[in-house]
Amino acid sequence: MITRRKFLHRTGLATTALLMDHLPPFAQSAPVKALTLDSNTLAKFVDPLPIPPIAKPDRYQPSPLDPSVKIPYFRLAMQPFEMKVHRDLKPARMWGFASGFPGPTFDVRSGQEILVEWVNQLPAKHFLPVDHNLAGAGADQPEVRTVVHLHGGKVPPESDGYPEDWIVPGKSALCHYPNNQDAAMLWYHDHAMGINRLNIYAGLMGVYLLRDDAEDALRLPNGKYEIPLVISDRFLTPEGQLYYPVSDKPNAPWVPEVFGDTMIVNGKIFPFLDVDARKYRFRVLNASNARFYHLSFANGATFSQIGTDQGLLPAPVSLKALMIAPGERVDLVVDFSGHRGEEMILKNDAFVMMQFRVSRDKVDDASLLPATLRPVQKIPESQAVKTRMLSLDEYVNRVAEPILMLLNGTYWHQPITENPVLDTTEIWTLINPTDDSHPIHLHLVRFQILDRRRFETSSYMSKREVKFTGEAELPDASEAGWKDTVRAQPGMVTRIIVHFEGYAGRYVWHCHILEHEDNEMMRPYQVLAKP
Ligand SMILES: [Cu+2]
């Protein structure tokens, strides 16, 4: 029996989740091991690292803002396709944008608005286990639904990919992305209510690079020396097909988290990349459903983190290892010049991710790693007009297995409770009494992490009182930039400061562990127009 606790790679003490005894017992019994391929039996470093193609506009058409201006128009279809995730496996059935996993990379400039028509060309039946008990995924709903969200984009509400704004196969949706924001690595992915975890697991995601002049002026490694690394994990069947685990209840297949045992980078298992002995820029995205990665080089090499979710840090941070949660991005510069002729392995603790084969030849490298990158002005706490106390809750059954996750004890369908006013600043205080780290993502905005502070979870569970047991800890240098996803750590109160700007309208905030998000750990929020 694989229990949730065994699935969890993170350590946890006794669960502090709330007990719900009126619900039937739940167990994730799936005999996962018997059904799945042991990826350690596969040959390592036999496939070159794929680089997703750059998306090309289909045509230019009038801007919705000013019909006299013609802007790039892209059309991307979501399609079923087959791809080899490893040389020695048969092609796996997947769903992807333009038949790719990851889909094509958008490479666009700040200030250059674009239109994207997202076309659903998927079959009417899902090939992964839909749980009809989840909100929005009832048996009365079409089984296959998609809606695309541009994660990290400052996007008008009608183009943001609201989870209920899904379309069915045969339909398309036109989205307008103004790109009025700083350079950053964004990503696009499905966000359909109740089946988001399955659609992304099937492959519906891609990278969206937004550039600007300030970043160009830094002369960071670019062109073929700038490479996206989309990391994710899957289970595969012995035949090499995607396997999504299920509970032991045929009518309620949802499982609390999926931690696949097969690591995939840009769509390949254990890929290799031939590199010159010089600096490279790697744009890393954790596109996994639930797995957090602790990345490092097996030879202990140091590297520099230059950016986070919403663009460049104030200055590079020298690291030997980093943590990245689902939905987060890190921007890295790795200098291979001191490693000529070496084979360097990138690993996630015990898991091998990929290999870099460094050329023996000396090369000229005109790219720079500047000592300062850009100013990041700290938002003063005094600017906040409101502080919200928001709890992250897990509900368990009699055998301590999670059956439901809520934000502030509130279901998706309940009236909106978070309603900041446009152009005001708020502090959101995320109280996490669970033993999971929840990566919390707010649509529309970028924010800064103020601090994290340990608190007494048991007294919080009984009395809903926050009793701090430690000092406030400032985010470390690698998190001291603009973020759109924050790790709300277990047993801690995490505070973020957010300036709500861009658009009034309805958005969502949610946990980016996709199994949590699909089971109620997502709430609508409303940015109110200025009075
Ligand atoms: Cu969560």
Image (cartoon, rainbow, N blue to C red):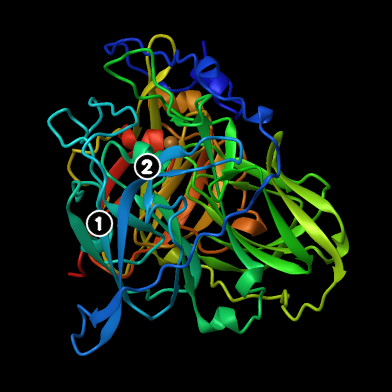
Q: Residue at x 25, y 56 (%)?
A: 119
Determine the secondary structure under disc 1: strand
Determine the secondary structure under disc 2: strand
Q: Residue at x 21, y 70 (%)?
A: 530
Q: Up-down: is 293 above or below 148?
A: above
The residue sitting at the left extreme is 140
Do we see residue 436 in this rendering? no
| x then y, percent, for residue 127 | 32, 32
Cβ(mark 2) to ligand 1 < 8 Å?
no
Q: Are marks 2 and 1 in contact (CB under 8 Å)?
A: no
Residue under numbered circle 2: 390
| x then y, percent, for residue 164 | 20, 46
- Left or right: 124, with 282 as reference point: left
**Which mark is nearer the camera, 2 or 1?**
1
Do we see residue 96 in this rendering? yes
Q: Amino acid at mark 2?
A: Leu
Please state which of residues 418 and 406 is positioned toward the viewer in this rendering.
406
The image quarter containing residue 67 is: bottom left
Q: Residue at x 15, y 35 (%)?
A: 141
Q: Earlier in the sequence, mark 2 or mark 1?
A: 1
- Left or right: 339, with 389 as reference point: right
Quadrant of the rendering where the C terminus is positioned: bottom left
What is the crowding at mark 1: few (fewer than 14 residues within 10 Å), some, or many (at least 20)? many
Q: Amino acid at mark 1?
A: Val
Which label is found at residue 157?
none
Ligand 1 found in image quarter: top left
Q: Up-down: is 70 above or below 51?
A: below
| x then y, percent, for residue 376 | 56, 72
Please state which of residues 420 and 248 is positioned toward the viewer in this rendering.
248
| x then y, percent, for residue 398 | 39, 9
What is the crowding at mark 2: few (fewer than 14 residues within 10 Å), some, or many (at least 20)? some
Residue under numbered circle 1: 119
